[in-house]
Image: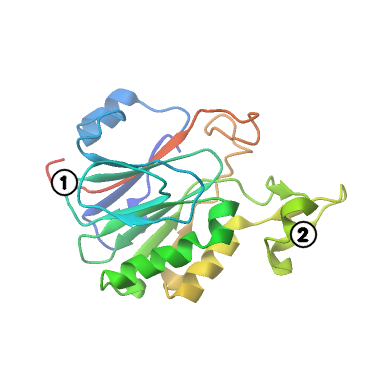
Amino acid sequence: MNFGEINSKFDNLQIEGHFISKKFDKKNFQSSYNLNLMNNKKIIIPQQTHSANVKFSDLPGSIPRCDGVFTSNPELVCSLKVADCMPIYFAHKSKIIFGLVHAGWRGLTSGILKNTGKLLKNLKYELKNFDIVIGPSIQDCCFEIADDIKDHFSEQYLQIKTNGKYRVNIQNIAVDFLIKIGFSKQAIHIIDDCTFCMEEFYYSFRRDNGTQDRMVALIRYKNHNN
């Protein structure tokens, strides 16, 4: 996945999601969105801290201490940066409301998906009316943890390895949380690309020794003159 479109999973054909990986055609990106990554006049940019904070905004620009953003403004683009954590796309099946959530193990275990559901319910949206896509992220083939954080996870999600560490499938955790909160199981889709394994296409914080390089997730209302 290079300048990958994920909107094929959305019932709402007016909402468009993209995932910009390690290699992408910058000219194609800027032409498609009529903007660039540093132009915040149209982009909502969360200042991610692995928090459980999810915000709604109809204004562009930076949002401090935030790992999830939603908007109903068709002129705006929601964005996230990731390098192993899950970018989770949300698109309402018929209305103009869409967003992105950055979920790694810290966000998952501290309740970012629960807070996402709470935000949307407070805005008077029914959770079953959203399509959800979990984008490229580290998979259980490569995500391992040690005893120091294993207590953050239910035993059902842990697989012990011969080296004494544990494999964890954070995508399954996210799906189970989303269903428990009230989202529809049938509306959740997982892109099973592993960011750790697929070095040619993806940056990986774990594989690349804490690299500062990131992929970018974007979602917008595509038929508006962005």
The colour style of the image is rainbow
Picture coordinates of residue 39 (x, y %)?
25, 30
Q: In screen coordinates, is 59 left or right of 140?
A: left
Q: Is residue 178 above or below residue 209?
A: below
The secondary element bearing badge 2 is classed as strand
Q: Amino acid at mark 1?
A: Glu
Picture coordinates of residue 163 (x, y %)?
87, 47
Q: Quadrant of the C terminus?
A: top left
Q: In screen coordinates, is 123 left or right of 180?
A: left
Q: Amino acid at mark 2?
A: Gln
Tell me which residue sits at (30%, 28%) in the image: 38
Which residue is outermost to the left? 225
Residue holding disc 1: 75
Mark closer to the chain start, 2 or 1:
1
Which residue is outermost to the front? 64
Asked if disc 2 and disc 1 are in contact, CB closer than 8 Å, the reply is no
Q: Is residue 12 above or below residue 66?
A: below
Tell me which residue sits at (22%, 29%) in the image: 31
Crowd class of label 2 (few under 14; some 14 to 19; many from 20; radius 10 Å)? some
Q: In screen coordinates, is 27 left or right of 176?
A: left
The secondary element bearing badge 1 is classed as loop
Quadrant hosting residue 37: top left
Picture coordinates of residue 220 (x, y %)?
25, 48
Tell me which residue sits at (35%, 72%) in the image: 127
Q: In screen coordinates, is 32 left or right of 17?
A: left
User: Residues under labels 2 and 1: Cα distance?
Assistant: 45 Å
Residue holding disc 2: 159
Which one is nearer the viewer's eye here, 28 or 85? 85
Picture coordinates of residue 206 (x, y %)?
64, 36
Q: Is residue 163 above or below residue 22?
A: below
Crowd class of label 1 (few under 14; some 14 to 19; many from 20; radius 10 Å)? some
Which one is nearer the viewer's eye here, 15 or 157? 157
